[in-house]
Image (tube, grey):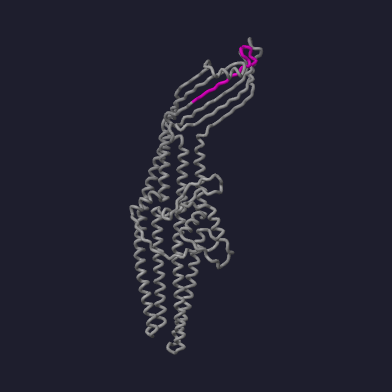
Amino acid sequence: MLCFRPFLFSFFFCAVSAVSAGAQQSPVHMELAELTRVALERNLEIAAQSYETRASDAQVSGAYGIYDPVAEAEAALGVSREFSNISVISTSDVNEVKYRRLNLSLSQLLPTGARASASFTNGRDDSNNNILAIDPYYDSTLKFSLVQPLLRDRGRTVTERGILFAIKERQISVQNLRARAFDVLSRLRNVYHNALRLRQNLEYRQASLDLAREILRDNKARLESGVLPPVEVLEAEVGVKQRERDLLDARRAYDDALDQIALLVRSDRPVAPADLELERQPVHFREEQGFASALRQRPEIMQQMRLIERLDIEGEVARNQVLPRVDLAAEYSHRGFDDRYADTVGDLADDDLANWQVGVELSYPVGNRAARNDLTRVRLLRRQQSVLLNRLKEEVRIEIRAALRQIEVSDKIVDVTRTGRRLAEEKLDNLLKRQKVGLATTRDVLEGEQDLAAANFDETAALADYNNAVTDYLRISGLLLEQAGVRFIAQVRKDEDGPLLGMETP
């Protein structure tokens, strides 16, 4: 597989811009596979959507921040004063404590919904109260705690709901990106086939003009020989002028189609299809096969399914929030107390001042209307999206049936127009032979030639319609990118200007 990189498109752009701008620039000839690559990589609609997808990817990465440990530090210096009710012992009616605090803590959220924390607190107190045996004194505590929800807020889904929501939003954004690619590729294929049709029509018009000019030369020669009346020459001259006008119209339509291709691939010069003719490739599509493929790959269906999955997550969270809050809380700590800080820290290793606590905390809002109504809301929205998904599936099945019928009808029209073109060729050949022996007029020949040009146009139009019908089926069934050999590959980059997604093709 070949992964297309941006420098390839810089090369293409430089090649396209190498010739100075002018009214009659020669077109760049490209095959459909190459046009697909360039259009998908350079199209502005896809580029704009890719930024949204990148933003959603950043949102997913940011949502995992709930598991980032939280470190806190506190330093304080102050004085606390209060009236004393033991003035007999105290040297003052006011107790004054000068204190210093230095506290450190680290907490971590766990997937179960629990929060674990470790803290180290330090304090120094200096009091004017004579009743204290140790003054000033140092007080340090090393404490570990864990709070685990047993009902409400318990479980990975509830804990990571922000992450799961962000992932679903990113999946929806990726499907938006795929939908843009479907739209661009569908338009490109239709314009490409139309350009092939118009180019073949241009060739037919040129051949028609050449034949009319040849008839005019023959008529002039026969007029000079005295075997043809002057009106026949006039008929031939009028036929040449008409075909020159038809050729100009065909040229204008073809140039317009080249400009449409150039617009899709963002080229400064017209872009023409490679030297290929319209073909009718046999296809073997089936309704059930196409329907199953659409359920797997159609962007609209994938988006709807992601919405339902998001509501399923919301429903699980909402059911959890209806429950009462019951938390298991556990603490274990060692404390140090002394008149010297070093001795205080040393006491932390002893069990003399070890403390522990295990308990259960319960809280429940009476009525709990907010949680209950939120659960009802999510259930109703989930049913709504399921109904919309079923309707979308029914529409897709109808679209697939219509696309298959269109392919079948277009295939038969190609056979009919091909037969009509062969008949027109035979009639013109007979008219040319009869003209040479004086059994057909110039008008008869020109009309026969005009019938052949119309038959050729009908055949190429039928071939273009057939190919467009195939494209429409591939789009409806979700096989368009796969059939073109294109698939998105994740290439997440942190820089703002780099592409989010690359594309691979055989």
* Residue stretch in magenta: 127-145
Question: For the C terminus, which image quadrant?
Answer: bottom left
Residue 428: which quarter of the image?
bottom left
Q: Which is nearer the eye, 114 or 265?
A: 265
Residue shown at 42% from the left, 28% from the top: 150
Report the residue that reaches farthest toward the top.
88
User: Can residue 356 be seen in the rendering of this structure?
Assistant: yes
The vertical placement of 371 against 342, above or below, is below
Report the residue that reaches farthest toward the right.
91
Residue shown at 66% from the left, 14% from the top: 92
Residue 459: which quarter of the image?
bottom left
Report the residue that reaches farthest toward the front.
1
The image shows residue 269 at horizontal and vertical percentages of 54, 63
Q: How many marks?
A: 0
Residue 464: which quarter of the image?
bottom left
The image shows residue 66 at horizontal and vertical percentages of 50, 35
Residue shown at 37% from the left, 74% from the top: 424
The vertical placement of 24 against 114, above or below, is below
The vertical placement of 477 against 346, above or below, is below
The image shows residue 212 at horizontal and vertical percentages of 45, 78
Residue shown at 41% from the left, 47% from the top: 304
The image shows residue 401 at horizontal and vertical percentages of 34, 56
Q: Which is nearer the eye, 75 or 88?
A: 75
Q: Is residue 131 magenta?
A: yes
User: Can residue 370 be seen in the rendering of this structure?
Assistant: no
The vertical placement of 135 against 474, above or below, is above
Q: Is residue 59 magenta?
A: no
